[in-house]
Image: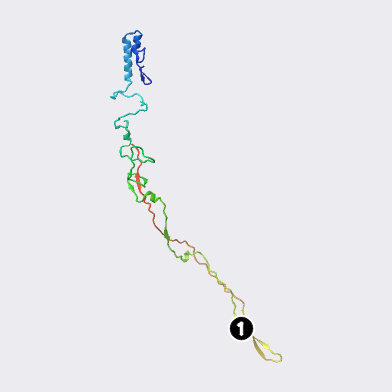
Amino acid sequence: MPWLSGTYSRTDGVRTGSTVWQQAQAAGIGIESTAQDVHDQDIATALNLCLCKDGSNAATSDLSMGGNHLRHLAPATAPDDAMRLDQFFPSGTSLLFPGAIPVGWTISTAHNDMTLRLSNAVGGTTGGTVAFSTVFGSHTVSGTVGDHTLTVGEMPIHNHSVTDPGHAHPMAHQHMNFVAGSNAEHPKSDGELLTGGAYTGVSIGNAGGGAAHGHSWTASPIDFSIQYLNVVVATKD
């Protein structure tokens, strides 16, 4: 068996190792055609289990590189070719990085303080006029509330009170006095008499309709035309 766990060992069918012929000589065995054929066939079998560097044969199982590299590969051109690292990300490829960029990449300063907008058309185009940090920064809204004069219908329903303290009407009168021993009448006035108090019973009906009303509002506008960069989602064919 020429190969054992990836290690080749010579044999003549009886003896193995790097001193097969010395072992045979020590045993008093001369060169024999049978032993020579076994030995040479063992070498041939071992060579047949090797990969030819000219590509004339192929591996029959997975190859382990033992933690080593395959170097100086040609660029892949077919779907089943091994790819070089520089082919995964050709020069000029743009990717998003959430943290520090890896070696071999350079930060692009073409776009800054922008948001990403998902597009189903073309990526890379931009739009908007206001920086991201400005749109979502702190804003103080100021303005004025317009005046409005209430109509009668917009006034709350209400009534008005009337105070009526009551009043009386004066009435003058006279009565006759008779003097004893005389038939003469002597008029006499006792002053004024007042009639009983009286009230008007006046009341005023409700006014106003309680309808809703509005006020105009004038304020400085906030521009939400945020700057953006279009990105697309693509699936590899």
Question: Is residue 41 depicted above or below 191 in this figure?
Answer: above
Horizontal and vertical percent position of residue 166: 59, 75
Residue situated furthest top in the rendering: 28
The residue lying at 31 percent from left, 12 percent from top is 36
Residue 22 visible at all: yes
Horizontal and vertical percent position of residue 150: 46, 65
Quarter that holds the N terminus: top left
- Crowd rating for badge 1 (residues with CA inside 10 Å; few <14, some 14–19, many 20+): few
Q: Observer-nearest residue: 142 or 100?
A: 100
Tell me: 214 left or right of 8. Answer: right
The residue lying at 39 percent from left, 49 percent from top is 133
Quarter that holds the C terminus: top left
Question: Is residue 205 depicted above or below 90 in this figure?
Answer: below
Q: Observer-nearest residue: 147 or 2?
A: 2
Question: Could you say which quadrant of the image residue 169 lies in?
Answer: bottom right
Residue 216 visible at all: no
Q: What residue would you read off at disc 1?
A: 172
Q: Give, as a three-letter code, the residue at label 1.
A: Ala
Horizontal and vertical percent position of residue 80: 32, 30
Horizontal and vertical percent position of residue 14: 36, 12
The residue lying at 60 percent from left, 81 percent from top is 170
Question: Could you say which quadrant of the image residue 171 lies in?
Answer: bottom right
Q: Give the structural element (helix, strand or loop) at label 1.
A: strand
The residue lying at 61 percent from left, 83 percent from top is 172
Question: Could you say which quadrant of the image residue 90 lies in?
Answer: top left
Q: How many labels were placed on the picture?
A: 1
Question: Is residue 24 depicted above or below 172 in this figure?
Answer: above
Say how the picture is coloured. Answer: rainbow
